[in-house]
Image (cartoon, rainbow, N blue to C red):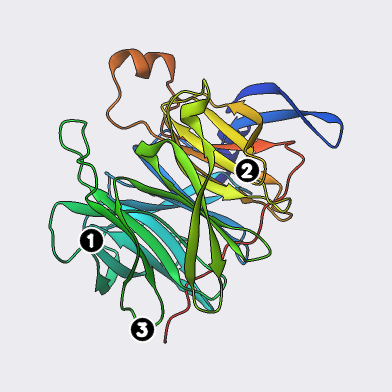
Amino acid sequence: MRRVIHKYVLLASVLVALVHGRRHGWEHRVSVNRVTDAFGLSEGPHWDQRTQKLYFVDITNQYIRRLDPATGEVNSAYIKHGPVGVVVTVDDTPDKLVAGSGRDVILVSWDGDENEANTTIEVLCSVDTDRNQTRINDGKVDSHGRFWLGTMANEVNGQVSPNEGTLYRIDDKLEPKTEVTPVSISNGLAWDKEDNKFYYIDSPTRQVVGYDYDPQAGTISNKKVIFDLNKTELQGVPDGMTIDTDGNLWVALFGGHHVIHVNPKTGKLLRKVKIPAENVTSVTFGGPLLETLYVTTSGYNLTAQQRKTTPYAGAVFALKGLGARGILANSFKMNQ
């Protein structure tokens, strides 16, 4: 079976694009290859350097999925508890994950090697306890092992009520602390390698903002807009985000068909890479040298025309040849 899947993945290359952006004076030929089947609302990619596997979530179908790039095999764990907005690994614990499901932060017991229909979970804490029409969306872990995650209103008839969400910070005491409120659709997060800047996206604003960051206290201050899509001709809204070792951001454009590369210090758009799906949801670097950019997309709630023109929407894509490297993802530190 693994041999068949691997052959399928090797044949699944859908695009090779010449990216018209220059880095160190060179143009890069970037390959954009599909590496999974098309799922639903694929989101939140998290690269586990220990196992060389890619975790991601399928939000509305309530799955945590894990891709083995060496074989092309994807294993899945169904989370009966509710929609899964984000998943991260737990520090020094190979068979434990922390995820956001509904409005709860849960501990998931799953080795990732088999499909799991009745996944064992434990509720660690809850957020948005003063309301019941929201869910956890994107999140990441900082250098001290604290889990930053945000919420948004549940989508109703394709619409999301504004200003119902909050960005939280959760440490090993499992007591959520409010960092930014209100927000509408809490999405991309990233810290620079110097660990003194924090970047954040509230999607409907169509802006990427930056904060000064204190890694010891885990606090943010001095908000500043560092890239504003409203001042460009780019389509869609910014969604998930990651950062490279040069301090530049890679941002998924939901409704925009692209991943964009942005210098947060100058606010300059460096380049853009077209993805064969309209709703690009998130990005992360992976691979042994963190040189592959994994891109998640959404196949959820598409029109018949969208499904016809983007049949692979909902799949994960791998971008190679970017000439950039990522920063290792952090794992959540909790009292064992």
* Circle nearer the N terminus (2, 1): 1
Amino acid bearing label 3: Lys
Q: CA distance from mark 3 to mark 1?
A: 18 Å
**Residue 202, quarter of picture:** top left
Q: What residue sits 54% from the left and 28% below the top? A: 258
Task: Looking at the picture, tell me which residue is in the foreground, 221 or 217.
Answer: 221
Amino acid bearing label 2: Leu
Amino acid bearing label 1: Arg
Q: CA distance from mark 2 to mark 1?
A: 29 Å
Task: Looking at the picture, tell me which residue is in the foreground, 9 or 81.
Answer: 81
* Circle nearer the N terminus (2, 3): 3
Q: Secondary structure at mark 3?
A: loop
Which residue in the protein does label 1 denote?
A: 103
* In the image, residue 127 above or below residue 174: above
* Circle nearer the N terminus (3, 1): 1
Residue 124 location (% of width, % of height): 28, 75
Q: CA distance from mark 2 to mark 3?
A: 33 Å
Q: Secondary structure at mark 2?
A: strand
Q: What residue sits 47% from the left and 71% below the top? A: 219
Which residue in the protein does label 3 denote?
A: 173
Q: Nearer the viewer, mark 2 or mark 3?
A: 3
Residue 123 location (% of width, % of height): 25, 73
Which residue in the protein does label 2 denote?
A: 293
Task: Looking at the picture, tell me which residue is in the foreground, 265 or 248.
Answer: 265
Q: What residue sits 33% from the left and 79% below the top? A: 174
Numbered marks: total? 3
